Image (cartoon, rainbow, N blue to C red):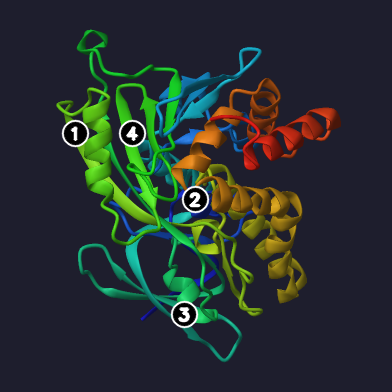
Amino acid sequence: MFDAIHDVVVVGGGPSGATAAADLARKRRKVLLLDRAGRIKPCGGAIPPRAIRDFEIPEGMLVAKVNSARMISPKDQRVDMPIDEGGYVGMVDREHFDPWLRSRAGAAGAERADGTFEGLERNDDGTVTVVWTEKDGGATRRTRTRFVIGADGANSAVGRAVLPQEKVPFVFAYHEIVRTPDAAAGADLEPKRCDVWYQGRLSPDFYAWIFPHGDTVSIGTGSAHKGFSLKAAVATLRADTGLAATETIRKEGAPIPLRPLKRWDDGRNVLLAGDAAGVVAPASGEGIYYAMLGGRLAADAVEEALVTGNVRALAGARRTFMKAHGRVFWILGIMQHFWYSSDKRRESFVKICRDKDVQRLTWQSYMNKELVRSDPMAHVRIFFKDLAHLFGFVRS
């Protein structure tokens, strides 16, 4: 039994898929948003002002506003990086943020369904049939559609069904959401500060974090080393910061890709977006803004293909994204490969973060999602300071 034909089926209802579904529904396209209910991705929850502006995220969705970050080195150097001029980074809790995005897509006109993607079938008329099962082992459904957007996360099942598999580096992330303790409990925690721990004992190749979420706190870490115990590292971090006895609300883990795929579409009618396309920033692991942008670009590309009948429009999503952010991803990838490779280098990296030029340019780039070009001498100064640390001219 086939459902009526859709213009687009979006598989995955996270920030990328929900954004794509909402954008296409606003264009009066017949959209099905298929999501496997109950999944919450481990995520620090940080979203920059650019995301709040571009995607009209209301104040009420922010559980906290962070105005500084603290970097902690292997030798326990603690470097504060305040955001100047009253700026802030918004924090969201994915348990509530993702359902709100899906509801917004529904309000825009997208049809919603809870179910699990099973496969794709090609039809003689050029359409594709999405095979999926209803929630809790329900009936098998078949939805015929002109286009499919796969926004179903890392190791995308949609991507595996239609694209050659690429070897992409992954970090497996794990966090525990705990109740925010009373100030009198003496925990090492500030409600408007994100703490980032660059210590090999907590992550041999990435970092650990403590991010405030208002009434709750995200405590997590990530690593690509399969033998490294993420749960043990989080337990250590909780013990070190006075959060061991704090009530644990939930625990989550998931792989995070750290390089955009070389190809996002099949040249016919399937296009990937978000984590499925690999758009998580190396070094930082930031994904929400890039996922939402990827969803919007996917929606734009599919809309163009629907209007013109030219499926080559699908490739425009990746082309536009990489033109805007490919250089940043390349730089962050090099930074992660070099600075996160040993505690000695992590120590130097945290020391570099004391520099006011580094702090200012880092925040300006993060908040606005573009490389800062207005102060070339600051970049020159940072370059020579990096060389000094690299060659050991500066003592850690």
Amino acid found under the numbered disc labelled 4: Ser
Pointer 1 or 2: first along the chain: 1
Looking at the picture, how far across and down is residue 373, in whole percent? 82, 35
What residue would you read off at disc 1? 248
User: Which residue is drawn at the image coordinates 19% and 34% (left, top)?
Assistant: 248
* 229 sits left or right of 199 in the view: left
User: Which residue is drawn at the image coordinates 68% and 62% (left, top)?
Assistant: 318
Circle 1: element type: strand
Q: Quick check: marks 2 and 4 in contact, CB under 8 Å?
A: no
Circle 3: element type: helix
What residue would you read off at disc 3? 161
Pointer 1 or 3: first along the chain: 3
Quadrant containing the N terminus in the rendered view: bottom left
Distance, label 3 to label 2, CA atoms, is: 35 Å
Residue in the foreground of this view, choosing between 24 and 176? 176
Pointer 4 or 1: first along the chain: 4
Numbered tag placed on residue 218 in the rendering: 4
What residue would you read off at disc 2? 341
